[in-house]
Amino acid sequence: MITCASIYTYEVDDGAIALAELKAQLDEKITLLENTVGIIMCHTEFIQTGALKFVCENLPFDLVGATTASQAVNGEAGELMLTIFVITSDDVQFRAGITPCLDEGIAEKTKAAYDQVAKGMPDKPKLVLVFPTITMPYTGDTYIDVWGQIAPDTPIFGTPALDDTLSFAGSETIYNGASDRAAMSFVLCYGNINPRFLIGTFPKNNVTPYEGEITKSDGSIVYEINNINAYQYLKELGFAGDDIPVKNFLFVPFQIDFKSRSDYDGVAVMRVLSYFTAEGAAVFRGNMDENSRFVFSTCSPEDVLATVMQKIEEVNAMPDVNGVLLLPCIVRRMVLGSTPLAESEYIRHNVKAPFMMGYAGGELCPTSVTDGIPTNRYHNYSLVILVI
């Protein structure tokens, strides 16, 4: 059995007041069982004032998570918030940890951190929650690949930390009272837990007539599309200018298949085009495999709200929902323009179970789970949902 509750505070200046507010809600909403963990997300100011550290040091369970831009919990949504999603159980165990600095390598250091945290556990985890930072020099696919080697056939769910600036320079992962700009915190979940996943992207009928094939790429860098220089290809379609490619390509979602992968499950994922190199290569926020095909989607405020409405309806119709963790891409918030809280407001008014929502810097979530084997993927533009 799992029991969940979301607690929150807007008190950023005084850690003692923030703690008192959180404890009052905790006592009112939930009785802690034998094993407990808290998923924590907050605005970066809670780190700067010391309120985060004070709160973490005075709550009786591990706290793991990330900074974010805005959040929602049951009945509340806002920007300058600290929220905690409390998960407690008698038959699920939680092991929390953090890697050392990952600036100069990720695989060995993450494996060492995992081995230390998982020591003594007889089985592999049933679920791994991960929180790196958006400013580290890796694509989200790197985290999927690394954790796939460490904990094979285990669902991976999480997000890189971000903040509310365009550079995301203040993004930090959180582990108990500490925060770090170059590490990755994580939670290993063992025992009687049945994670389920939903992914909301833009409607399938919102695609343009244009499609292409990646004919030359290396990871997230695309050199050629349909055997044409990537910049020239996109320029011909109007997504790049004569000298500087600046035609709002951040808001042009690429919906790409991974048909050449052995684990392709027929589900496309979304990709953000970040920038072009001087040689005309297109750099994306996630891997763009050679021989994969893509189409362009549209993204409007109406598209964002349509997908969140559909997915929340699906969540509310599911049986045995103890708690829900929602991570929508930060670009969805940008697309909402003059109403940036519209998605979080809809979520806070309509999710029936205890939940927490925080904006994501890229989303790590399985596209499917077949016979207990997940197809872990990294996403952009998407709303990913974990139901436990």
Image (cartoon, rainbow, N blue to C red):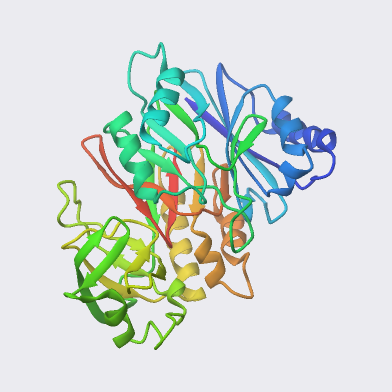
When the figure is inspected, residue 204 is found, relative to residue 25, above or below; the finding is below
When the figure is inspected, residue 45 is found, relative to residue 306, above or below; the finding is above
Which residue lies most toward the top here? 120
Q: Quadrant of residue 201?
A: bottom left
Question: Horizontal and vertical percent for residue 88?
Answer: 55, 26
Considering depth in this image, is 357 or 69 the residue closer to the camera?
A: 69
Considering depth in this image, is 8 or 317 the residue closer to the camera?
A: 8
Which residue lies most toward the front here? 278
Question: Horizontal and vertical percent for residue 210?
Answer: 25, 81
Tally of numbered tags = 0
Q: Quadrant of residue 11?
A: top right
Residue 190 seen in this snapshot: no
Q: Residue at x 22, y 71 (%)?
A: 224
Considering depth in this image, is 60 or 46 the residue closer to the camera?
A: 46
The answer to whether 18 appears left or right of 34 in the picture is right
The answer to whether 52 appears left or right of 89 in the picture is right
Question: Horizontal and vertical percent for residue 185?
Answer: 52, 34
When the figure is inspected, residue 294 is found, relative to residue 260, above or below; the finding is below
Quick one: quadrant of the C terminus? top left
Q: Residue at x 28, y 66 (%)?
A: 222
When the figure is inspected, residue 383 is found, relative to residue 16, above or below; the finding is below
Residue 160 seen in this snapshot: yes
Considering depth in this image, is 261 or 103 the residue closer to the camera?
A: 103
Q: Residue at x 50, y 65 (%)?
A: 331
Question: Horizontal and vertical percent for residue 20?
Answer: 81, 33
